[in-house]
Amino acid sequence: MKILHTSDWHLGHILYNYDRTQEQLCMLEQMVNIVKEQKPDVFLLCGDVYHTPQPSAAVQTMLTNALLNIHKAQPNMVIVVTAGNHDSGTKLEIFQAPWRELNVYAIGQVEKEHPEEHIVEVPGKGYVIAVPYSTERNLPEGFFQQLTSLTEELNLKGLPVVMTAHTTIGGCDFRGHDHATEMTVGGIDATDLALLGDGYDYLALGHIHHEQFVHSGKHKVRYCGTPLPVSFDESYTHSVSIVEIGKHGDTPNVEKKEIINPHPLVTLPTEGFATWEEATVLLSKFPADIPAYIRLNVEIDNFLPLEAQTEASQLTEGKQCRFCCINARRKAAQQTEAKMLSVQEFQAEEPVEIAKRFAEDTGIDFDSEMQDMFRELMTMVNEDARNEERRTKE
């Protein structure tokens, strides 16, 4: 059985207020061409189809057209689409019945009562156990092993078995994800691989954007990665995975097919940080005919010039590149300085200012929206405290 494994399309993603439709259409066209060239038996899209649970009509149309073109490129191919944590599982299943006429299986929710609904037969080739994203509390205990056991009962000819999942596997390489730790990536807690059972020949994973094998010692657990970068920190090759499995029990053979982004995400300088003056020189010298998104890595003494954003935007006028943001950090010597407050200073400080100090020290972007949310939360806390005080007096 030959499989095209992809995930994390994030259709509808907006990058610093820039619409990325043209890049995504280019990616989808490359996807169709890879299907024509490779002629897989199965096309797996393992979650985060959309960037938000409520995609616009235009974005949904983009997916519909893409799946139709992918089907036309290989009409006998089975297409399996599962929901990720960015998707609405119910929305993904709305057109489940008509999609079946085009060999498309859209699976958005866990079927506890009818687990057999997660098993998709690829006639004469093998089986796909399609599991969408679900929180741990919504998954019955031993659910993955239950599915592989059901598949084993059906698989009388010893055909390949592939399982999908959209989750964080403990020990994976999560480079490129914001505010990620070994315990949680993208809001999904790390899962022990053993909890996903056994009995599959290949575990097709979604959620982590960096393509990789998860080192389980079996060379059959893989994240295919996202075909387009979602952030500037995803500074690695983006691709889809072509997987071939001879029979049940065989080790999969995997080949990567790179996806070219017509609007790459470029950080200046390409390594390390520059002074503001050096960064503006690099930006001014960036070729006018190269379409790209630009981030500046800038090392500062105290603060950026007030006009920094405006100046950077002006330096890209008339060019095909698009200035996005300034990633500023203080010089190392200043980063180690302890910002100590006396008790009196601490008591006099506004809570939002203390939160801003904490965010700055830990590298969190505490933007105006987050500050507004913090102030709103403090208002609620203070109101609750006043109400409690009134009740105590009464």
Image (cartoon, grey):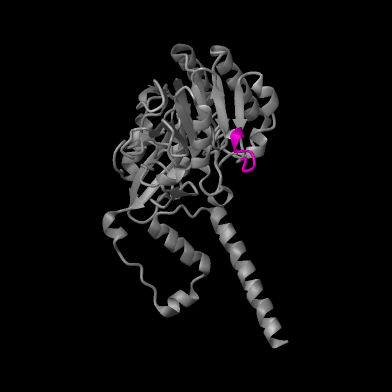
Q: Position of residue 243 (x, y in %)?
A: 41, 23
155 on left or right of 287: right
Residue lying at the far right of the rendered structure: 394
3, 276: nearer the viewer = 3
Instruction: Identify the magenta region.
Output: 111-117
Which residue is at the far bottom?
393
Whether 177 is among the magenta residues is no
* Residue farthest to the left, as pictured: 333
Image height of 151 relative to 326, above or below: above
Q: Tell which of 27 and 3 is nearer to you.
A: 3
Q: Position of residue 240 (x, y in %)?
A: 43, 25
Residue 27 visible somewhere in the drawing: no
Q: Residue at x 36, y 34 (%)?
A: 212
Q: Is residue 293 visible?
A: yes
Residue 298 vertical position relative to residue 80 in the rendered view, above or below: below
Residue depicted at x 30% and y 59%: 334
The answer to which image quadrant residue 92 occupies is: top right
Q: Quadrant of the C terminus?
A: bottom right
